Amino acid sequence: MITIRTATESDLPAMLVIYNDIIVNTTAVWDYEPHTLEMRKQWFATKQEQGFPVFVAVDNHKIVGFASIGTFRTWVGYRFTVENSVYVDRFCRGKGTGKLLLQKTIDAAKELNLHSIIAGIDADNEISIELHKKLGFKEAAHLKEVGYKFDRWLDLKLLELILK
């Protein structure tokens, strides 16, 4: 059974393995080089400083995914809008983990009295797009060839959820 809980610093090594696999093997993150544990620690510290939650999905005492919300854009006028991120271990996809994590971030955003959540998703990632749509996100933009990875141009879809 998969449970969702607030992440702790001791979860970072397991989260790093998931994140680096995604960097190296997918277009879910448009970075080229794996991150270091120090980079993940800085990322986590920034989330904590900014008051944004990070959640992990745990299955049989093993971290199988993580999610967070964070700054969408840095100008003060955007302070009620966040961007979400959801990452699931390659061996655990398709089991509902992403849905549980995404729902938890939506609930957290509501508790923080935020107004909207933006998801930036590779336009070819139909599974992630459909997951977001199932939880109420609507496509707001399709940006052509704004990213480059694996020797090809990538389109980005922006999906938006207005919180009630």
Image (cartoon, rainbow, N blue to C red):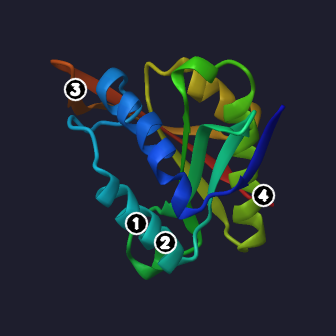
Q: Which mark is drawn over residue 3?
A: none
Q: Which mark is drawn over residue 78?
A: 2
Q: Nearer the viewer, mark 2 or mark 3?
A: 3
Is 1 situated left or right of 83 in this image? right
Q: Which residue is mark 1?
A: 73
Circle nearer the N terminus (3, 4): 4
Bin the neighbour count of mark 1 within 10 Å (Cα to Cα): few under 14, some 14-19, many 20 and up: few
Can residue 136 be spotted in the picture?
no
Mark 4 to mark 1 CA distance (whole Å): 21 Å
Can residue 40 be spotted in the picture?
yes
Circle nearer the N terminus (2, 3): 2
Q: Which residue is mark 3?
A: 149
- Residue type, mark 2 in image: Tyr
Q: Which residue is mark 4?
A: 107
Mark 4 residue element: helix
* Quarter occupied by the N terminus: top right
- CB atoms of marks 2 and 1 within 8 Å: yes
- CB atoms of marks 1 and 3 within 8 Å: no
Circle nearer the N terminus (4, 1): 1
x, y (%) of residue 50?
Answer: 50, 77
